[in-house]
Structures are given as C-alpha cells and as structure tokens.
Amino acid sequence: MKLIHLSDLHLGKRVNEFSMIEDQKYILDEILRIIDKEEPDGILLAGDLYDRPVPSAEAVQLFDSFLTRLAKRKLPVYAIGGNHDSAERIAFGAHIMSSSGICMSPVYDGKTAKYCLMDSYGEVWIHLLPFIRPSVVRHALSGEESAEEIRTYQEAVQAAVEHMEIEKDKRNVLVAHQFAVGAVSCDSEEITVGGIDQIEVSVFSDFDYVALGHIHSSQNVGSPKIRYCGTPLKYSFSESGQQKSVTVVELLEKGNLEVREIPLKPLRDMRKLKGTYMEITSLSNYQDTNTEDYVQITLTDEEDIVDGMQKLRTIYPNLMRLEYDNRRTRENQEITGTEAVKKKSELEYFEEFFELQNNQPMNEEQRKFSEDLIRKILEVNL
C-alpha cells in the first residue's frame, strides 16, 4: 500500500505581506506530477489546508482545483482540518464528496471517521482525527463520567484515540494534526506558551503509521512510523536551509514500513544573503542566481544605506526583509522571544511581572490564587 503524505498547505498564506498563491499553485502542480509518477493508492492531507479559518476566495478556488484533479485521477483523498482551519468548513459537503473519493474529516463529536483500503496483504484502515482541543473533547464526551477530567491536550488526544475502533491485528494509519513532544519547530508555526499543546507520541502506539501535520519541518518523532512531512513551501527564513519534500509511505505486511522523501523545487526559493551593499549588488554575486527568489538581506555596512530597500529591490524584486549587522545593531539587546516562550509557563511570566511591579516576589497565597486563576482562564480557552 503506497500513500502520499502531505500537510500544512496553508493555502492563502501571506509571508511578510507577500501573497504565496502563485507559489502554492505552482507547487501543487509539482505535487501532482510526483503523484502521477508514483501512482499511490491514496493521499493523506494532515491539516492546515488553509492558512486561516475563513480563507480567501483564491485559496478556496485553488484547493477546489487540487481536489478536483485528484478526483479525476480516481485517487482517494483522506483530509483533516488543522488548527488554522475551520472544522465546520472542512466538513462541509463531506458526504457528497466522499462519493468521489474525497474523504474530509467530520467535526469531532466523540467519534472519528475511518476508511478501508485493500492490497495483497489485506486491509489498511485510515483513521481521521482532526485537530482537537480539550474543550472540544470534553463537550463531545460529556455523557461520560471521566469527561470533565480532560484538561490537557495529552488527555484529550488520549481519550479520542481510546474511543477509536482500532483492529490491532490489521494495519492502521492515523492522520492527525497535533504537536508531538520532541518535534523541532520553525518560526512560521504558532507557539503556545508553556508548551501546553504538546502530547507524548506513546498515545499513537497502536498505529502502523501516523501521518502528522502542524510542524513545518519534515521529521520523524520517536520512530519512522510517526512522522511530520512538513510544508511543501518555506514560510519563514528559519526554513531557508531546508529541502522541502513529499513523503511517500509504503506499508507492506504488518510491521514492515518504508518511508522516503521526494524533493520539491519551488517557483521561488527563500534565501538569506549577507554582505556589504557593494557585495550584495555586485553582478558577480547574483548573475547565476534566481533574483526572483524571496530574500532576506543582512547588510554589514556601518552606515545605513539611504533608501536601501528600494535600491535593492531593483535587483531583488521579492526582497522581504532588510536588516543590518554592524557595531550599532550588535550593541542592541536581543530579545530571544521564541526560547522564552518554550521554557516559561504562564505562571512564571506573571510571577516575573508581579516582582517587577511590586519589587518583591509573590507570597504563597498570592501564587496559589494566580495559579488557580490562570488554570480557569486556560480551561475556557482550551
């Protein structure tokens, strides 16, 4: 059984105010060419199909065209909504589309959809688990005694998996969109304070392959059978050194799995350039490169270049960001926001703020009150 694993299309995304629609249309055409060459038995779309819950008309038209072309190839598609998607919009028309082999995840109601594929080794069950929050699972399982105890993402996903109908002697594939502990993230992803949305991969132990979405870098988590395929395009300069790809999964007999990557070549790459203004604008520096690429330029001149952005765009029309690395900027204090977000909880942030405001740390009673209040606020938002 050969499957193509895709995720995080983020159709309609803008990067530094540049629309990525043209690039996304191009890369979907490239993906279709790979699909035609590989001749898979099915396509897995692991969430964040759109970049926002209410996508633009262009994004909807592009996704409609992609699904239509897959349906014409008689290829079954198994798609779920991610945290950027509206679960209701992804589920709209699911019953009608399923007759054409386009299987969209329904809104989570305590049950998950599953579909069967057959090959020479027997059955392969595809399970669809859209992005879920603890509040969604609590509501869906409200008739059960333990439902109100679901407070964390780990507990929510664990409960959802426990309610799945899994035949463990068969081969089972899960399509999901969650943040697994140990995954390496990029700047283009949403980071949750304190890492409260992270889950342990042990929750997926009953599956033969877990097609994950949410993390933008292709990577295995814990084992080759639990994998993020990453985005088909670069959406931040922290990804400039990555090679984007399509993940091909081949399930043989139960317990035997092969995973490989097929590189994707974008319409425009995303690159970082660094040097003096004279070096960056030298013909020898750019004549053999694609000057239409999206670039971040860091100038090392001690003096700022007057109208530097406009001047550089005569050579690099898709210059997204201009920075300086010189004596002045190196003296500025850097704020490592991403690292702080990963390492500190909401309570730790508030304790620091309290101490700055009051010139003394919280006492135990104040700390307990703040902790209870933060927990209540998080429960409302989860």
Image (cartoon, rainbow, N blue to C red):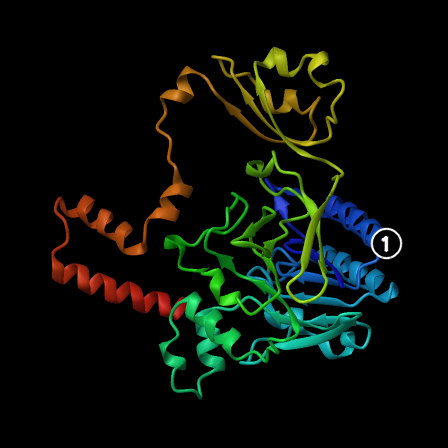
Position in image of residue 51 (x %, y %): 62, 55
Position in image of residue 240 (x %, y %): 61, 35
* Amino acid type assigned to the residue bearing label 1 in the image: Asp
- Is residue 382 something that shows in the picture? no
What number of labels is visible?
1
Using the image, determine if residue 167 lies above or below residue 276: below
Describe residue 268's horizontal placement relative to residue 15 as left or right. right
Position in image of residue 331 (x %, y %): 36, 21
Describe residue 189's horizontal placement relative to residue 4 as left or right. left
Front residue of 142/321: it is 142
The N terminus lies in quadrant: bottom right
Using the image, determine if residue 16 lies above or below residue 305: below
Q: Residue furthest bottom?
A: 143
Q: Residue at x 44, y 78 (%)?
A: 138
Examine the image and state in which quarter residue 105 appears.
Answer: bottom right
- Is residue 258 something that shows in the picture? yes
Position in image of residue 190 (x %, y %): 50, 52
Q: Residue at x 66, y 74 (%)?
A: 170
Residue that badge 1 annotates: 36
Examine the image and state in which quarter residue 356 appears.
Answer: top left
